[in-house]
Amino acid sequence: MENYVLLAEADWLRWFVTDTQIPGWETVATGWIAGILVMSVLVALFASLIKYWYRRSARNLLAFHWVENRRGLTWTPQPTLLLVSFGFLPILLFLFVIWVSSRDFRNVVGIPGLLLGMVCCCLLYAIIILAIHLAPSWRRHLYPF
């Protein structure tokens, strides 16, 4: 409970809200930030699972598009970047649906908080997906080292 109070009293929490006069705005803002964190982690894990499934099936299908290229990779950087960029669409869509579905989010968070939340969620998603690609088996798919 103490961690929740410390999180609610943070000044950066006010960045995500437009109306701090409404009672309980801290709870709404904390819920919005929790939704941002959960959404970015879930979409990053889902995109990684899709990539893993495609890579796993590419080894068994010789006619698959990404099976072999000049570097001998089963997955090139272009599909990886395409997959990462497609991950932004569900983030934007789901955050908008979450924001519209709750009157508290619309009243307290407002449109500026929605846009800032979308930007923060997309940045967090990009950081997570790039960190996942630091794994030794996937590093060559995105990074040249």
Image (spheres, grey):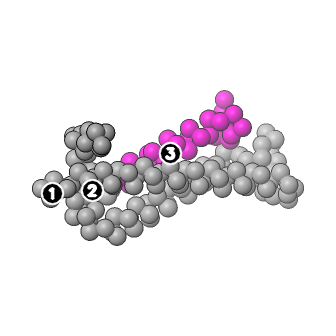
Q: Position of residue 100 (x, y in %)?
A: 33, 69
Residue at left offset 27%, top offset 56%: 28
Q: Position of residue 72 (x, y in %)?
A: 81, 41
Among numbered discs 2 and 3, the one appearing first in the sequence: 2
Return the mark for residue 2: none
Among numbered discs 3 and 1, the one appearing first in the sequence: 1
Sort mark 2 into few (<14), some (14-19) or many (20+) by Cα contacts within 10 Å: many
Task: Give the SS element for disc 2.
Answer: helix
Residue 82 visible from this viewpoint: no
Q: Which residue is mark 2?
A: 28
Q: How far apart, in angstroms, are the residues tagged by discs 3 and 1? A: 34 Å
Q: Position of residue 86 (x, y in %)?
A: 55, 58
User: Residue extending furthest top?
Assistant: 145
Q: Which residue is mark 1?
A: 23
Does the magenta stretch mainly form a helix, a strand or a loop?
A: helix
Q: Which residue is mark 3?
A: 126
- Write the start and end of the magenta stretch as one range: 116-145
Tag 1: residue type? Answer: Pro
143 or 120, which lies in front? 120
Magenta stretch encompasses residue 142: yes
Q: How far apart, in angstroms, are the residues tagged by discs 2 and 1? A: 10 Å
